[in-house]
Image: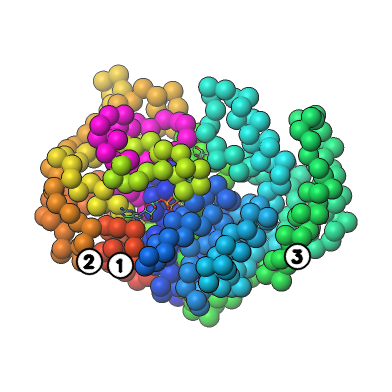
Amino acid sequence: MPAIVVVGAQWGDEGKGKITDYLAAKAHAVVRYQGGSNAGHTVVVGDDRYKLHLVPSGVLYASIECLLGNGVVIDLPELVKELRELEKRGVNTSRLLLSESAHLILPYHKLIDGLEEEARGSASIGTTRRGIGPAYRDKVNRAGIRLCDLRHASVFRDRLDANRKEKAGMLAGHGLDWEQMAAQQLEAFAHVEKQVRDVGERIESLLDRGANVLFEGAQGTFLDIDHGTYPYVTSSTPTAGGACIGTGIGPCRMDAVLGVTKAYCTRVGMGPFTTEAMDDEGDRLVDRGAEFGTTTGRRRRPGWLDTVMLRYAVRVNSLSGLAVTKLDVLDHFERVRLCTAYEAGGQMHKSFPADPELLKCVKPVYEDVEGWNCDTSGARAFSDLPQKAKDFLKRLTELAGVPVLLVSVGASRDATLELGDPWELRRGR
Ligand code: GDP
Ligand code: IMO
Ligand code: MG
C-alpha cells in the first residue's frame, strides 16, 4: 500500500510526467500537491502526445482517480479548458477531484506577475507569467480566495472586492472588468463544483484500504521556495515535504520518494547554472533533447549532470532512488560529463552552497566518461544498454549515493528500463 512521491531533482522538466504516467500503471490515484499551470508535463501514449498543466499525469488511465491537493493554485478557466480539451480527445476527466482548500489564480495575479517581471528589468526571474507568485503571496498574506469560497457567491464577491480595493493602486489603468471576472469564475466553478471536496480525507481513505497513491511533484528541487536557488525559484514547495503540506497527509504515511533527473541538465528562466554548456555541446543537447518548454515554448538552457545538486536533492527530499530520463539524448557524444564538485578560490565544495554570491563564483569540476556512440532508444531492458552507458549510470549512482531504479530512453511508456520496482520501496532507506 505504498504512497510514493515523485519529485524533480533539478530545475523542472526532468520528465516527471512521463515517469508518473509509467508508475501510474500500478496506482489507484495520482495527486498533484503544489504549483499551478506553470507546470507542463508531457505524456506520450502510443502516437498521442498530451501536454498536462494542472491535471495529474494519471488521467490517461481509465481507472485512476486524479486529485488536486490544497497546495495547488488553480486557474479555474484554464483548468476547465484543459479538461474540455482532454474530453475532446476521448479522455474521461470525471475522476478528477479538487481540494476545496486550494487557492485560486485570478486574472489580476497573472497581470501582476507580468508587471512585476517588467519592473525587474535585467533582474527578471523569467517566470511563466501564470500568476503563480502573486497567488501564493495572497495565500500567505491571508488575502487569497479558495475554491470553497466559490460555493457562496456573496462570500466570493466580498473577498474579490477586498482584493480589488487592496490592489487598486497597482492595477490602476489596466482595465480589469471585475464584474466579468466574477461571472467567469462562478461559471467555471459550476463546471467542477461536484468534484470539489476534502481531498486529504479521500487520500487517507484510499491509503487505509491499501491503495497505491502517487504524489506528482511539479517544478523541481532547485525551484523550491526554501531549498532552491532563491530568488530564482517558484513560489511553492516542490520538494517532498510539500506533498504532505499540499495534501493534508502526514509524513509518516509516505513510503518512498523517487527523484527524477535527466541524464544531463536543463533550466528555463534566469538564475545560476554551474554546469551550463553555452557551446556546441549545449546546442546538441537542446537539439537532440528537443529542449523547448511545454508551457511557454522557451528554449531551455542546457548543461551537464551536476551530482553536487543531485546529492543535495537526495538530502532535502530523502530520495529513496532515482529515475534517470533522456539517456538516449546522450547517445552520440564523444564524452559525457559528470560534475562531481565545485571549486572556488582554490577551495573545493562537495555540497551545494545556499549563498548565491558563492554560487556565482564556483566552477564545476568534471569527471568525463567516454561516450557510447550508439543508439539506446530501442533498449527495453537494462541489459540491452551498451557497457559504456551502464558505466555512466553506475558512476552516477555512486556519486548520488542512492540507487537508479528507472532509466528512460524515450518519451513513450515502453522506453523505460526497470532496475527495481519503485512500488516495492518501503519506508526508510
Ligand atoms: P516534466 O515537466 O518533468 O514532466 O517534463 P516535460 O514534459 O516538461 O519535459 C520532458 C520532455 O522530454 C517531454 O517532451 C517528454 O516527452 C520527453 N521525454 C521524457 N523522457 C524522455 C526520454 O527518456 N527520452 C527522450 N528523448 N525524451 C523524453
Ligand atoms: P514543470 O512542472 C521548468 C520556472 C520558470 C521561472 C521560475 C519561476 O514542467 O517541471 P513561476 O512561473 O513558477 O513563478 O516561474 O520557475 N518554472 C519552471 N521551469 N519547469 C517547470 O515546471 C517550471 N515551472 C516554473 O521558468 O524560472
Ligand atoms: Mg515541464
Asked whether 328 falls inside the magenta stretch, the response is: no
Give the labeled residue for mark 2. 380
Pointer 2: residues within 10 angstroms few (<14), some, or many (20+)?
some
- Mark 2 and 1 residues: CB-CB less than 8 Å, in contact? yes
Whether residue 221 is visible, yes or no, is no
Q: Position of residue 292 (x, y in %)?
A: 41, 43
Residue shown at 68% from the left, 35% from the top: 112
Q: Earlier in the sequence, mark 2 or mark 1?
A: 2
Residue located 13% across and 48% down the image: 372
The label number, if any, that marks residue 190 in the structure image: 3
Estimate the spatial distance between the alpha carbons at disc 1 and disc 3, rounded to whole Å. Answer: 39 Å
For badge 1, the amino acid type reads Asp
First of labels 3, 2 by sequence position = 3
Residue at figure coordinates x 53%, y 72% from the top left = 90
Query: In x, y percent, where is residue 230?
Result: 51, 34
Task: Count residues near mark 3 (Cα–Cα under 10 Å), then give few for <14, some for 14-19, many for 20+.
Answer: few
